[in-house]
Image: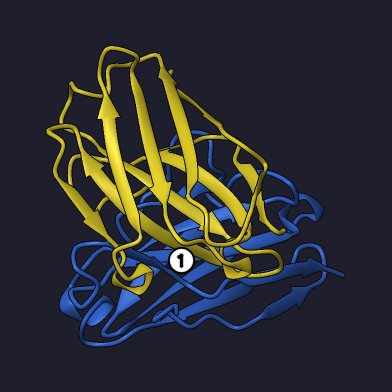
Amino acid sequence: QVQLQESGPGLVKPSQTLSLTCTVSGGSISGGGYYWSWIRQHPIKGLEWIGYIYSSGSTYYNPSLKSRATMSLDTSKNQISLDLSSVTAADTAVYYCARGGHSGYDQIEYWGQGTLVTVSS
Amino acid sequence: QSVLTQPPSVSGAPGQRVTISCTGSSSNIGANYDVHWYKQLPGTAPNLLIYGNNNRPSGVPDRFSGSKSGTSASLAITGLQPEDEADYYCQSYDISLSGVGVFGTGTKVTVL
């Protein structure tokens, strides 16, 4: 059973970079040809896809983030990371790490529990 | 930002049937991309309910069913139960979003 656990600071100041890590257990992030995602949920709002990183390292980002997002894999630690630069209050959300299928069109099969990040001075 | 529109809320009495629509366009559902559905309880991550338009993962009751036609999809819940009260989201893929998926606006189901 694949398990995902997000970690990172719960409070980030405006204009700084938000950095989160997702630790995966029960499977290798570099094997199986899966898509690994970061998804966020704003308070009282719906879900927004931040981007994918494929097990090969290829990345796809939501254009609405205007190139502020960067995702990477650390295969030695079996972790996926997210950096989101120049944050504002609008980036306050619960951030989820998730694993999809073998295609970017597939469903999300595994989710982390989510971590709340608040952007405030 | 979402390009998939759902009704904000639906409600029904126990035992009734409710449906949730997910309306898209020719760049997502209408482009023949699959639709998936998730159920989210307060304070928890979404959980897969339907995948590939009309398939249930193991453990999901057959009271839940999905369908897709044209640029829309629907989730039906028959024999509504108190534990069905939750938020529900559809998900698909949109060719205008640089390879990233998209979620619906979400629907709150209330069991009266």
Name the residue at 59% across, 70% down. A90
Residue B50 vs A91, above or below: the answer is above
**Residue B7 location (% of width, % of height):** 60, 83
**Residue A46 location (% of width, % of height):** 58, 68
Query: Can I make out residue B79 in this image?
Result: no
**Residue B73 location (% of width, % of height):** 39, 75
Name the residue tied to disc 1. Answer: B90
Residue A92 vs B42, above or below: the answer is below
Which chain is tinted blue?
A: B
Q: Is residue B85 left or right of residue A107?
A: right
Query: Can I make out residue B37 in this image?
Result: yes
Q: Is residue B84 left or right of residue B112?
A: left
Q: Quarter-wise, where is residue A73 in the image? A: top left
Disc tally is 1
**If the image is split into quadrants, where does the N terminus of chain A sit?**
top left
- Compare residues B2 and A95 and report the one nearer the observer: A95
Where disc 1 sits, the SS reads: strand
Name the residue at 30% across, 43% down. A71
Q: Is residue B35 left or right of residue B45?
A: left
How is colour applied across the structure in the image?
Answer: by chain
**If the image is split into quadrants, where does the C terminus of chain A sit?**
bottom right
Which chain is tinted yellow?
A: A
Name the residue at 24% across, 72% down. B97
Q: Quarter-wise, where is residue B52 in the image? A: bottom left
**Residue B104 location (% of width, % of height):** 47, 72
Type of amino acid under label 1 = Cys
Q: Quarter-wise, where is residue B69 in the image? A: bottom left
- Compare residues B62 and A73 and report the one nearer the observer: A73
Residue A89 vs B57, above or below: the answer is below
Q: Residues within 10 Å of mark 1 (few under 14, many from 20)?
A: many
Name the residue at 51% across, 44% down. A96
Chain of the residue under the numbered disc 1 shown in the image? B
